[in-house]
Amino acid sequence: KVCGFDMNPIVFDRVWKRYRIGSKHDSLRDAIPTMLRRLSGRNGHAIREDEFWALNDVSFEVKKGETLGIIGPNGAGKSTILKLLSRISKQTTGDIHVGQRLAALIEVGAGFHQDLTGRENIYLNGTILGLRRRQIDRLFDSIVEFSELEKFLDMPVKRYSSGMVVRLGFAIAAHVDPEILLIDEVLAVGDLSFQQKCMQRIMELKD
């Protein structure tokens, strides 16, 4: 069992995550008996034909000041781990501790309202990440400058390219000054110069 829940910003302790491949039930009448069978004495690690384990007994710690990269082939569970850490989804069993302010860039457009403008989404996303309006006001110009999207600020985000969405999302997350920053492969859709700019900012955050 992993120790250090009080000391380390991130602790993943014997975590399992189960997903269903699809539903075989066409009606509530069919689903209720199955649900009752699942609630009555089922082994927590038992698995059915229509399920699979995305994570199987995974444990790790990340200490303050450390950087951790998770690598592996498609389907290995990398994005699942990040979604569990950011509380987008919940583990099936095991314990997860995230003890500090967190910002996550996991999916392009996550946290943005597609019908709102870039300007409005800066305030929306900043609020979601825990900033007060006056803090966003103070950071606004710097966020816009970093994103290089000044002339597109009053355009709805649904008209942005995926690269533009990533620019805005990273610019906001990087200015929240998070204690924990989660980044999936989302930066891969940006152009090379912006990727380099993001890496420089990540190194500044690490320092």
Image (cartoon, rainbow, N blue to C red):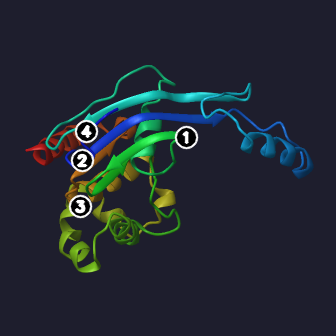
Q: CA distance from mark 3 to mark 2?
A: 17 Å
Choose mark 4 or mark 1, whichever is in front: 1
Q: Amino acid at mark 4?
A: Gln
Residue that numbered label 2 is attached to: 9
Give the quarter of the image for residue 140: bottom left
Q: Amino acid at mark 3?
A: Val
Q: Secondary structure at mark 3?
A: loop
Q: Amino acid at mark 2?
A: Pro
Residue 165 location, x and y as percent? 40, 52
Residue 93 visible, this orientation: yes
Residue that numbered label 1 is attached to: 92
Q: Is residue 174 left or right of residue 91?
A: left
Choose mark 4 or mark 3, whichever is in front: 3
Residue 104 location, x and y as percent? 35, 50
Q: Earlier in the sequence, mark 3 or mark 2?
A: 2
For the C terminus, the quadrant is top left
Q: Residue drawn at (22%, 39%), measured in percent from left and top?
A: 193
Choose mark 3 or mark 2, whichever is in front: 2
Q: Earlier in the sequence, mark 2 or mark 4?
A: 2
Q: Earlier in the sequence, mark 1 or mark 3?
A: 1
Q: Earlier in the sequence, mark 4 or mark 1?
A: 1
Q: Residue drawn at (42%, 31%), measured in percent from left and top?
A: 78
Residue that numbered label 4 is attached to: 195
